C-alpha cells in the first residue's frame, strides 16, 4: 500500500515538472493560444490523481482483510520495554494485536480503560480503543491472574479476547528467540509422550493466528499449523515482536475448546453467591429458633443467641448514627435487612432504598466494624450455613462429582503408566475434555469426558526404568498443593529416599488429595499448610548448598510440614465426614491396579515397622510377649494399653510402644478392609476412605520414621504473618 502511494505521488510530481517546463518555455507576454488547453489538461490530470489517492486511502484495510505479508513485515514496530509485566502490560499486548487486526501499525493511536463495574470471576474488563478511519473504534477484553501464587518460575494470566487464553510470563525474561522456541519444543515433547491424553501447552500459533491467519489453516492439524508459523517467524523475524512484552517473550495457550476444572468446581459450589442466596432467601431463619432448626437441622440456641446479640449491638449503634438529624426511630426491618446483607458476605450499594450515598457508606463501615469485632461468632454461623449448602450441592451433583474424582484418578494412573510426573497439579492446571456444546450435561457420565492437562512447565519424564538418570525438573509448585520435596533437587531426593522417582509421582498424589476434597466441598484442604510451604521455600532457597545441608533442611522442614498437613487432614475431613462418606467413587481397572500395588507396598512397610517397633523397645523383653505383640490385633493392643495405664499411671516407654503399635495395627486393619474393595471391579470406595488412603501413602513415603515425631510449627520457629507463613532460620 505504501508503495502504491509513492507511485501516485511520483506521477503527480512529474506532472508538475512538465507544467513547470511548459511555463518556462513560454513568454509571458506572447504565449501561443494552443498552450492553454495543455495547461488545463495537466491540471485536470493532477486533480484526478489526488481524488484517486483520497479514495484509495478511504477504502484501505478492512478489519477482516489481512495486508500482504511483505507489507506487514515493513510496518511492525518494536514494542516498548516494561520493567514488570503486569495486568496493564497484558492489556497493552492485546491492544497492539487489535491495531494489527484493524490494519493499523503499532504506532497508531490507541488507548484502554478499566471498566470497574464489569468483573467476571476474578477477571477485570477493559475497553480497548484504536483510532481507525478517522474515528475511535472499540472492543472489550477481560484479564486476571490465573490461580494462586506459585513457587514455580512463571506468573499466569487468564484472558478472554474472542477466545479463552492463558498468558504465562517467565520469571526470568527470555530475550533470545531460539531459546524461547526451545522451551516450547520441550513442552511439546511431554505432550507427545502423554498422547492421546489432551494436553495444552504454549504455541506461537495462539498469537499469530489472530494477526496473520493462513487461508489453509482449517485444513492443517495443530502441529502442522505450528510448524508453518515457526517457518514464517524465521522468514520474517520482525513478526517475533508480537510474541514479546517488553524485552521478554511470553507464552500463550489457547483454551477456547475447553473448561478449567476450577471453573467446573466453581459452577458446582459457588459458595460466595450461594451463601448470599441462602441467607437473603431465608431472612426469617435467624430470628426464629424453629426456623433455624428446621432449615439446618441444628439445635444450637447458643449460636443463634450469639448472632442476635451481634445484631442488637449493630442496631443500637445504627439508630444513634441514623437519628442524629431525625427525631423518629428508624424502623427495625431495614436494619435487619442490612445486617443480613453483610452477614451474607456483601455490602450495601449506592442507591439503596431509604439511604443517601453518605448514609450507605456509613452503614457499610459500621457493619464491617461490627462483624470484625465479632469474627468468631459470625464465622461459626457462616460455617453452619455453608455446611447446609455443601450438603445440598453434593446431594444434587453427587453423581457428577464422583465422576470427576474417577477421571482424576484415571489421570494419575495414566501419568504413572507414561512415566511422567506433573508436579504442579491444581484445578487451574486441569481441563475438562468433552463436547463443549453439551456442557454441563456431558458430566453426567464419566465416560463422556476426560481430564486433561494445561501447561507442563514443572513436569518431568522419568521413563519406565526407575534406575535411569531422571532429568532435573524445575523446583517449585503451587503452595496449597505442594510438599517440601517439590523444593529439593533430584540428588537430595535420591540421597534421602533412595527411590526419587516414587517421590516425584507421589507429589501428584498429594495434590490430587487436595483437589478431590475441593471437588466435593468447594473448599481448600491444605490452606494453612500451603502458607507454611512458602516459608519453607524461602528458607531452603536462602540456604542452598551441599546435599548434607539440604538433607537436614528437608528433615526439619518435613517434621513441621507433615504435622500441619496431618492436623488439617484430620480436622477438615472429620468436619466434612458426613459429606465425604456419601460420595461413592468408582475406579477404573488401571486405578485399581495402581492402588493394589500401593496397598501391597503399604502392607510390607507396616509389617516392617511393627517388627522394628517391637525389636527396638526395651520394656517388653520376654520373647513370648514379643511374639504376641507382633501378631496381636489392634483390639488386643488397645486392651493391653488400658491394663498398662492402670498398672503404670505415668505411662512411660511401655505406653509409647503400645501407642505406636496401636497406630500401626489400625493402619493394617484399614489396609485389609480396603483390599477386597479394590479387587472387586463392581465396588466403590467412599471419598473419605480414598482421601485417607492416598494421604497415608504419600506421608509414609515422604516422611522417614527415623526423623522422629512430627512437631508443631511453633516449636521450630514458625510464625504466621499477613497472608503467609514465614519460617525462621532456627530450624
Image (spheres, helix red, strand yellow):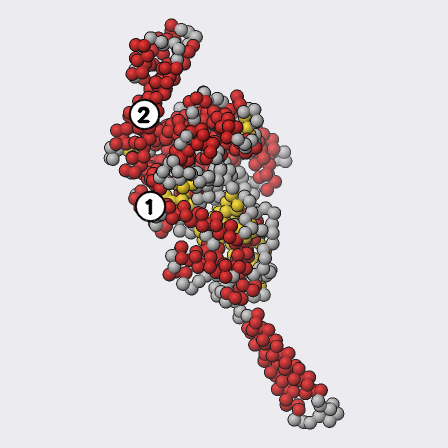
Q: Few, some or many C-alpha atoms within 10 Å of disc 1 (few <14, some 14-19, many ≥20)?
A: some
Which tag, 2 or 1, sits closer to the chain's start? 1
* Residue occupied by mark 2: 603
Question: Residue lying farthest right?
Answer: 29
| Quarter of the rendering containing residue 31 | bottom right
Percent position (x, y) of residue 251?
49, 49
103 on left or right of 450: right
Mark 2 and mark 1: Cα distance apart in space = 34 Å
| Residue drawn at the location 44% of the way across and 32% of the way down | 494
167 on left or right of 406: right
| Quarter of the rendering containing residue 590 | top left
| Residue drawn at the location 63% of the way across and 33% of the way down | 324
Viewer-nearest residue: 671 or 556: 556
Q: Quadrant of the C terminus?
A: top right
CB-based contact (under 8 Å), mark 2 and mark 1: no
Percent position (x, y) of residue 408?
36, 39
State whether residue 664 is above or below residue 210: above
Label 2 SS: helix
Amino acid at each position: 500500500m505504501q508503495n502504491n502511494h509513492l507511485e501516485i505521488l511520483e506521477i503527480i510530481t512529474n506532472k508538475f515538472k512538465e507544467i513547470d517546463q511548459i511555463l518556462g518555455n513560454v513568454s509571458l507576454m506572447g504565449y501561443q493560444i494552443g498552450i492553454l488547453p495543455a495547461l488545463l489538461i495537466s491540471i485536470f490530470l493532477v486533480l484526478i490523481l489526488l481524488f484517486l489517492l483520497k479514495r484509495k486511502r478511504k477504502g484501505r484495510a478492512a478489519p477482516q482483510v489481512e495486508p500482504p505479508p511483505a507489507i506487514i513485515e515493513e510496518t511492525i514496530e518494536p514494542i516498548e520495554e516494561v520493567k514488570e509485566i503486569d495486568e496493564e502490560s497484558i492489556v497493552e499486548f492485546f491492544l497492539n494485536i487489535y491495531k494489527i487486526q484493524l490494519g493499523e501499525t503499532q504506532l497508531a493511536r490507541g488507548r484502554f480503560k478499566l471498566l470497574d463495574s464489569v468483573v467476571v470471576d476474578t477477571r477485570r474488563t477493559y475497553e480497548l480503543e484504536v483510532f481507525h478511519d478517522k474515528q475511535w473504534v472499540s472492543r472489550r477484553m477481560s484479564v486476571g491472574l490465573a490461580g494462586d501464587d506459585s513457587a514455580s518460575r512463571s506468573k499466569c494470566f487468564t484472558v478472554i479476547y474472542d477466545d479463552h487464553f492463558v498468558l504465562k510470563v517467565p520469571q526470568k525474561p527470555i530475550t533470545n528467540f531460539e531459546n524461547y522456541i526451545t522451551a516450547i519444543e520441550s513442552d511439546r515433547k511431554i505432550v507427545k509422550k502423554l498422547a492421546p491424553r489432551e494436553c495444552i501447552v504454549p504455541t506461537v500459533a495462539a498469537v499469530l493466528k489472530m494477526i496473520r491467519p493462513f487461508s489453509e489453516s482449517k485444513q492443517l492439524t495443530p502441529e502442522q499449523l505450528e510448524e508453518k508459523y515457526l517457518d514464517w517467524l524465521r522468514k520474517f523475524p520482525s513478526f517475533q515482536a508480537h510474541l514479546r512484552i517488553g524485552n521478554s517473550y511470553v507464552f500463550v495457550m489457547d483454551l477456547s475448546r475447553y473448561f478449567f476444572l476450577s471453573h467446573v468446581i466453581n459452577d458446582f459450589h459457588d459458595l460466595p453467591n450461594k451463601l448470599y442466596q441462602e441467607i437473603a432467601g431465608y431472612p426469617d431463619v435467624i430470628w426464629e429458633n424453629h426456623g433455624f432448626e428446621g432449615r439446618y437441622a441444628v439445635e444450637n440456641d447458643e449460636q443463634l443467641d450469639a448472632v442476635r446479640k451481634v445484631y442488637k449491638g449493630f442496631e443500637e449503634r445504627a439508630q444513634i448514627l441514623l437519628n442524629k438529624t431525625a427525631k423518629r426511630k428508624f424502623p427495625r426491618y431495614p436494619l435487619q435487612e442490612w445486617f443480613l446483607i453483610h452477614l451474607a458476605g456483601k455490602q450495601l450499594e449506592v442507591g439503596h432504598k431509604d439511604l443517601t450515598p453518605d448514609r450507605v457508606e456509613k452503614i457499610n463501615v459500621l457493619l464491617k466494624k461490627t462483624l470484625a469485632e465479632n469474627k468468631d461468632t459470625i464465622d461459626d454461623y457462616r460455617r453452619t450455613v455453608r455446611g447446609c449448602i455443601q450438603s445440598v450441592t453434593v446431594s444434587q451433583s453427587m453423581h457428577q462429582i464422583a465422576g470427576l474424582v474417577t477421571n482424576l484418578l484415571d489421570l494419575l494412573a495414566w501419568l504413572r503408566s507414561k512415566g511422567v510426573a506433573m508436579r504442579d497439579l491444581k484445578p487451574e492446571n486441569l481441563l475438562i475434555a468433552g463436547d463443549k456444546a453439551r456442557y454441563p450435561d456431558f458430566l453426567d457420565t464419566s465416560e463422556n469426558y476426560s481430564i486433561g492437562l494445561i501447561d507442563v512447565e514443572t513436569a518431568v519424564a522419568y521413563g519406565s526404568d526407575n534406575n535411569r538418570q531422571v532429568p532435573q525438573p524445575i523446583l517449585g509448585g503451587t503452595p496449597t498443593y505442594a510438599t517440601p520435596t517439590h523444593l529439593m533437587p533430584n540428588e537430595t531426593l535420591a540421597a534421602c529416599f533412595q527411590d526419587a522417582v516414587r517421590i516425584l509421582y507421589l507429589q501428584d498424589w498429594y495434590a490430587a488429595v487436595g483437589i478431590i476434597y475441593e471437588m466435593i466441598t468447594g473448599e481448600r484442604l491444605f490452606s494453612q499448610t500451603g502458607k507454611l510451604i512458602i516459608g519453607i521455600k524461602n528458607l531452603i532457597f536462602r540456604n542452598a548448598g551441599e546435599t548434607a545441608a539440604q538433607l537436614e533442611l528437608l528433615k526439619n522442614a518435613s517434621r513441621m510440614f507433615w504435622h500441619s498437613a496431618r492436623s488439617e487432614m484430620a480436622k477438615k475431613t472429620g468436619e466434612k465426614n458426613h459429606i465425604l462418606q456419601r460420595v461413592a467413587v468408582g475406579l477404573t481397572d488401571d486405578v485399581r491396579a495402581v492402588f493394589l500395588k500401593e496397598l501391597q507396598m503399604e502392607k510390607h512397610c507396616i509389617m516392617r515397622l511393627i517388627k522394628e517397633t517391637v525389636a527396638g523397645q526395651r520394656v517388653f523383653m520376654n520373647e513370648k510377649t514379643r511374639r504376641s505383640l507382633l501378631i496381636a490385633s489392634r483390639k488386643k493392643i488397645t486392651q493391653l494399653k488400658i491394663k498398662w495405664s492402670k498398672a503404670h499411671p505415668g505411662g512411660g516407654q511401655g505406653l509409647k510402644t503400645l501407642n505406636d503399635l496401636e497406630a500401626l495395627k489400625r493402619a493394617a486393619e484399614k489396609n485389609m478392609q480396603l483390599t477386597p474393595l479394590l479387587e472387586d471391579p463392581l465396588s466403590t470406595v467412599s471419598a473419605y476412605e480414598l482421601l485417607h488412603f492416598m494421604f497415608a501413602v504419600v506421608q509414609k513415603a515422604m516422611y522417614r520414621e527415623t526423623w522422629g515425631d512430627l512437631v508443631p510449627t511453633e516449636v521450630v520457629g514458625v510464625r504466621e504473618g499477613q497472608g503467609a507463613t514465614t519460617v525462621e532460620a532456627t530450624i
